[in-house]
Image: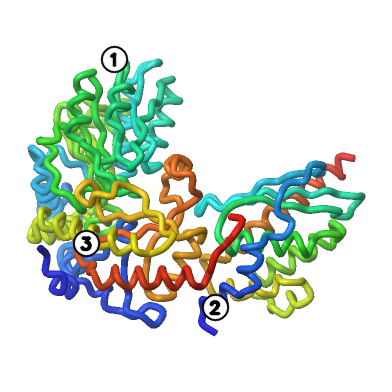
Amino acid sequence: MLDTARIRADFPILHQVVNGRPLVYLDNAATSQKPRAVIETLVDYYSRYNANVHRGVHTLGDRATEAYEGARAKVARFINAPGPETIIFVRNTTEGLNLVAYTWGRAHLRPGDEIVTTIMEHHSNLVPWQILAREKEAVLRFVGLTPTGELDMEDFARQLTPRTRIVAVTMASNVLGTITPVAEIVRQAHAVGAITVIDAAQAAPHLPIDVQALDCDFLAFSGHKMLGPTGIGVLYGRREHLERMPPFLGGGSMIRDVQLTTATWNDPPWKFEAGTPNIADAIGLGAAVDYLSALGMENVRAHEVALTAYALAALSQVEDLVIYGPPDPQRRTGVISFNLADIHAHDVGTILDQEGIAIRAGHHCCKPLMRHLGVAATARASFYIYNTREEVDRLVAALIRAKELFGSVVGR
Amino acid sequence: MSLVDELYKEVILDHYRHPRNRGTLADATLVVQGSNPLCGDEIELGLRLAGDRIEAVAFTGRGCSISQASASMMTEVIKGRTLAEAAAILETFKGVMLRNEPAERLEDLGDLEALQGVKRFPVRIKCAILAWNTLQEALTLVRERLDQG
């Protein structure tokens, strides 16, 4: 288990009073807080060796390049990728998923081909495929959910056909917390000749990931949800795909040679990193990966399973509180979406904020899933390595007070 | 009074629990939809006009207490008014909420005064404004129709 008290000491932002109460930060699925080690890495880079990468003939340029490529190697080890050349730095998960749609997708899809995804995807793993499908006259197919909010694997088998070219699935839902059986999804997708694109935005910060064991073709995640800075994300791609795919953006760094009317491409991963990259934040992500690796992702997961089990039990004691997603903490992450009686999620969010408790309220960029659940919005508490049972207790107490304030609302 | 009590005044919760003019008009002159894409709150506003007077008004929608209470209060205050009067009230309300004009201007506008506490919660101002933006669109449509004769 994690030593939460010691971990909390590493996060300066947690030690403050918000609206008169000590901050309880439960919006980690939106973005995580940053440990001092990450913040200091950024300051150190800008203070001591800020320079452009892959260009300089000077010492600072060498040091920046070494740190930037070192961060890539750390990320590769973190997800057990076969090598750093399979790790592309992007802005965030959204850009990683778009990169696959705009390069592999555009190069390979033919009219009538099929893209299989699910009804619980974040808009970032849905809208790029809608755009691609419209352009290529391809067909989108959707896998449904079981009554407890897990992926319906029988339905998944039904949606796969010989025309399926792409299977794009989340590894962990940002609303329901549902963990999907990625290895099995990949096995079945490959059996019909499809590639797999995994949205790991809510998985990489919380679960051990081994892309070689999963055997997936692409996997994307964001740095800022896993203790790293904003503006840096990762796309893992299988080497043979990256070699054959056309580039994404054109510009500096991504070329081997340029004539006036033609150009040839650099090797992966640089082929996909046009222009000066986000050097500082990539190095910062490397520091975040170091921090998580030192804790051990198995321990991170164990902490979150225990806290989620505690929270699910405590929240179920609140009258008229509806929790969405799998009831078994082993089958979900520490993301808990709920609605309290007939009180709108935004009202719940404002009332909790006045007690120093930060949660998310809204549709969570999952409007199709909201329609499936029959709600306009949900409130969402999401945990990370620094959250405690005492914070869950404060959440529960504040929810009970919110209910008292609103009383019973009729006619909603 | 705590900040939360200032936001969730009893009169606001009363409009939320018992919305006035909630429903649809069978013989509406026009129906306009409004939404806040970021939070998903929705309003559908129907007006029945007699000449330039708002003879009947009704709304449906879903969203937070502030957005729905504001819609309910708005329907009460514009019912029976002329289009020009409704436009003036709209300007007054948006002036107070968005341009920091004095809250006293809401004093003669029924329960709307209660919404001034929302100003203390900047992210929630858009909730209070939703119904009014929808009304603004309705008034613009009416004007266009009149201009086209």
- Does the image show residue A252? no
Residue A287 location (% of width, % of height): 14, 60
Circle 3 marks a residue in which chain? A
Q: Amino acid at mark 2?
A: Asp
- Between marks 2 and 3, how big is the CA–CA gap? 32 Å
Q: Is residue A29 above or below residue B104?
A: above
Figure quadrant of residue A249: top left
Residue at x 19% of width, y 27% of height: A241
Is A250 placed left or right of B7 in the picture? left
- Between marks 1 and 3, how big is the CA–CA gap? 43 Å
Q: Are marks 1 and 3 in contact (CB under 8 Å)?
A: no
Which residue corresponds to mark 3? A307
Q: Nearer the viewer, residue A105 or B90?
A: B90
Residue at x 38% of width, y 75% of height: A356
Q: Is residue A61 above or below residue A16?
A: above
On the same chain: label 1 and label 2? Answer: no
Quarter containing the C terminus of chain A: bottom right
The local crowd at label 1, few if under 14, some if 14 to 19, many if 20 or more residues have their Cα within 10 Å, is: few
Image disc number at residue B5: 2
Q: Nearer the viewer, residue A201 or A329?
A: A329
Image disc number at residue A162: 1
